[in-house]
Image (spheres, rainbow, N blue to C red):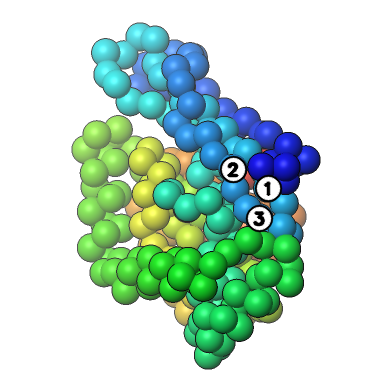
Amino acid sequence: MSKIKENLCKSYKPEIMNCPFCKAKLVYKHAVSNKVIQFSNARFIRIKNLGYACPCCNNSHIYFSQTATKLAFKGSTYSAKTVCMIDYYKKNNYGREEICDLLTAKGLIISNRNIDIIYNKIEEVLNQDYDKIIKDAYQRMLDEYKEIRISVDLITINEVCYVILYDYFTSEKLAIWIFNGLEDPKLEEYLDKYISSKYNITVLVTIRNVSKFYSMVKKNLSSSTKIISFEKF
């Protein structure tokens, strides 16, 4: 508990503060999540994801921050980067005790058992049928909101790139892809297949516009797509 007191508490609002239906200004309702996350640099930070709703539309939808969502996967108190690190080490044939020792040396508090639990959860996502999941999600957004909004994050570990695609409206992970760096030809192939102008994506939230990855994503999208950078953490 002392570690929590020593570190920050950060609150995040939705990146877009207007209702997608009537354009009214959203108003605060309640926190969607409020949890302490262990980051890969061993800091413990309380992250509050603030939920907002439309005061005019007669619906119960809550809008929230994509920045806060991408910091830690739903249900996890470890940062998304920490989870990807565990997957990376596992795929490089490290045993769970070795991984535990590596993370402990970085100041992270984690048990051997949690190593396996986290790895198995990320493998469940990696083994999904992305064609069906993404296309179904895009159609669901069109049916419900008349537009497609997504967010996409990049986590790099020793040149290996984890690209994570989220449903903007639900925060569900639609895909996790692993590439051998930004020069991996499969990265361009996947961006063209799933994050391109053919889907008429209206909003995409992603990493800051100084990066090569941002340029790669932007190149694939329509000029009408609104691109918002994750708030700097």
**Looking at the rendered structure, which numbered label has been put on residue 36?**
2
Q: At numbered mark 1, what does the secondary structure look like: helix, strand or loop?
A: strand
Q: Which circle's residue, 2 or 1, is located before the other in the chain?
A: 2
Left/right of residue 87 with respect to residue 155 in the rendered view: left
Q: Which of 168/222 is in front?
A: 168
Quarter where residue 8 is shown: top right
Mark pair 3, 2: CA separation: 10 Å
**CB-based contact (under 8 Å), mark 3 and mark 1:** yes
Q: Give the residue number, with chain letter if any, for mark 3.
A: 39
Q: Residue at x 36, y 57 (%)?
A: 174
- Which residue is pictured at 48% across the width and 35% down the height? 33
> Quadrant of residue 233 in the image?
top right
Question: Taking the image as drawn, is residue 196 in sight?
Answer: no
Question: Percent x, y for residue 168?
Answer: 42, 42
Residues at badges 2 and 1 in contact (C-beta under 8 Å)?
A: yes
* Residue 105 percent location from the top left of the image: 73, 72
Q: Which residue is mark 1?
A: 44
Amino acid identity at mark 1:
Phe
Q: Residue at x 73, y 63 (%)?
A: 107
Q: Is residue 35 above or below residue 27?
A: below
* Residue found 47% across the figure and 52% down from its top: 76
- Tell whether 48 sits left or right of 133: right
Q: Which amino acid, by three-letter code, is at mark 3?
A: Phe
Q: Secondary structure at mark 2?
A: strand
Callout 2, which amino acid?
Val
- 7 in relation to 89, above or below: above
Mark 1 Cα shell of 10 Å, populated few (<14), some (14-19), many (≥20): many
